[in-house]
Every structure is written in structure tokens, then in C-alpha cells.
Image: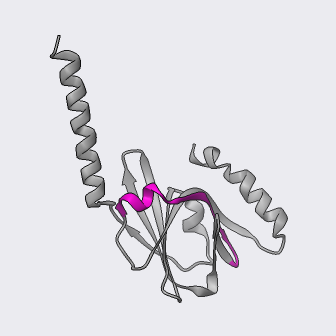
Amino acid sequence: MVDLFYGTKRIKRKFELANPKEKVLASDGGKGIVTTSNQDIQRGLDWVTSQRAVVLLTDKRIVCGKWTIPLDTISTAQLIKINTLFGRGQVLKIRTSDGKNYQFGMQFNPEWTRQQILPLTHEKGQVKHSAYSIIARLIAVGCIIYWLYYRFMSN
């Protein structure tokens, strides 16, 4: 469903036509963030405002929307498998030689585990909650309780 929403096959085909000397090894619709440190995966405001695009792994680089990360600048890469309320997912964490840290959240896709060009460490992980995420959930639950109370108890 995510790939249908993002038009992954269309974007992949368009990229291949524009870059015939590169082979796309994996692709998936996802969200991406850049951080200044190698932080844990957590829900928060940065994911609300994240870049949403198709993440492409080619034999030369990773492309996600306006970001291009040459493979020779990647110092570490982790693929963390997670379980969510909506099913299985994965987060690709990348650290580059210039100190940037990228996280790409995607639905689970075996293309990323089968590819051989990007040396990945595979891990199982959990998504942590940020203070923003906890406060937003408490406010949402409070609003629902308030609505239920006045909808059913005030009559």
C-alpha cells in the first residue's frame, strides 16, 4: 500500500531511464530524517516533518528525494527491523564520513536484506517515544475522554 501511495515502481522506472549506467538494487517508499548524532530510533517531531520520498539504493548511491548519498561516503549502515501497530517495518540508519546521520523508515522489504552492495548490520529494534510523542498521545487521549464524557454522560 505504501509503495502504491508513493508510486515506487514509477519513480524507480523514471530513475533508471534517467540514469542508465546505474542499477537500482532496492527501492521503497519511506520517510527520512537527518540528525547530527547517531541517535536511537524514536517517535517525535522530526518524523512528523520528515522528508517523504522513494528511497533508492543503486550500485553507486542512495537517493531519497533531494538527498543523494554516494556509497563511498558511507562509514556505517544498519538495517533495524521493527514491529509496529501497522505491521513489520525497517529503519535504515546511515552514518557518512562527514558526520551526517540519516534514518529512513520503511515498510519491511526483503530487497534491502538481499542486496550485496551496501554492507549492512542487521538488528532487531524498537521505536522509542520522545517527550513530544508522549505529550501528543496524552493530549489525544484526553480529548477522546472529554468527547466521550460529554457525548454520553451529559444527556
Residue shown at the point (64%, 61%) measured from the top left: 27
- Toward the left, the furthest residue is 153
- Toward the bottom, the furthest residue is 97
Residue shown at the point (16%, 15%) measured from the top left: 154
For residue 131, side relative to residue 62 (left or right)? left
Image coords of residue 122 (percent x, y): 44, 72
Q: Please name the colour scheme applied to the rendered image.
A: one colour
Residue shown at the point (29%, 61%) measured from the top left: 130
Q: Is residue 146 above or below residue 67?
A: above
- The residue nearer to you, when weighing 45 against 119, is 45
What's the magenta region?
42-60
For residue 151, side relative to residue 49 (left or right)? left
- Toward the top, the furthest residue is 155
- Residue 56 highlighted magenta (yes or no): yes
Q: Is residue 8 above or below residue 123?
A: above
Residue shown at the point (59%, 86%) measured from the top left: 73
Image coords of residue 74 (percent x, y): 56, 84
Image coords of residue 121 (percent x, y): 46, 77
Image coords of residue 80 (percent x, y): 42, 67
Residue 149: image quadrant is top left
Q: Quadrant of the N terminus?
A: top right
